[in-house]
Amino acid sequence: MDNEKLLMQFGTKIAHIRRAKGLSQEKLAEMTELDRTYISSIERGKRNVSLINIVRVAKALNCPPSELFSELGDNIGQY
């Protein structure tokens, strides 16, 4: 699996959880103290997110950070 695909899958998972919780990108950005454009770029797979920001996003989404990786499954083992 290439890096771009991995980042896209990670971002898609964040977007899915965010929408399921009824949050806009703007609201998630406010809750994490990150910029809305940064949230958007994560969700589009354009950012390689730091551990600190992963934890911030997970906390705002009220889920463990591990849940953000659940869709990646076996693909992580390729690294």
Image (cartoon, rainbow, N blue to C red):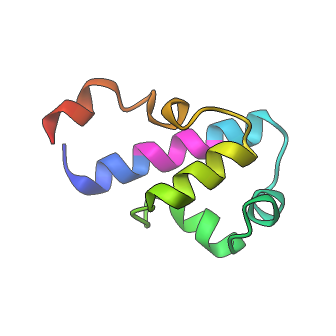
Task: Determine if the magenta segment contains residue 26.
Answer: no
**Image quadrant in which you'd find residue 36:** bottom right
Q: Position of residue 42 (x, y in %)?
A: 52, 60
Q: Is residue 46 above or below residue 65?
A: below
For the point 60% across and 71% down, the residue is 38
Residue span colored magenta: 9-15
Q: Is residue 44 above or below residue 16?
A: below
Decide which of 18, 65 is in the foreground and name it.
65
Task: Judge from the rendering whether residue 56 lies leftward or rightward of residue 6; answer left or right.
Answer: right
Task: Judge from the rendering whether residue 51 lies leftward or rightward of residue 77; answer left or right.
Answer: right
How would you classify the magenta stretch by its main secondary structure? helix
For the point 72% across and 41% down, the residue is 61
For the point 54% across and 67% down, the residue is 41
**Image quadrant in which you'd find residue 43:** bottom right
For the point 15% across and 42% down, the residue is 79
Decide which of 61, 72 is in the foreground and name it.
61
Task: Judge from the rendering whether residue 60 lies leftward or rightward of residue 14; answer left or right.
Answer: right
Locate the N terminus by quadrant.
top left
Residue 43 seen in this snapshot: no
**Image quadrant in which you'd find residue 70:** top left
Q: Position of residue 12 (x, y in %)?
A: 52, 44
Q: Position of residue 49 (x, y in %)?
A: 45, 61
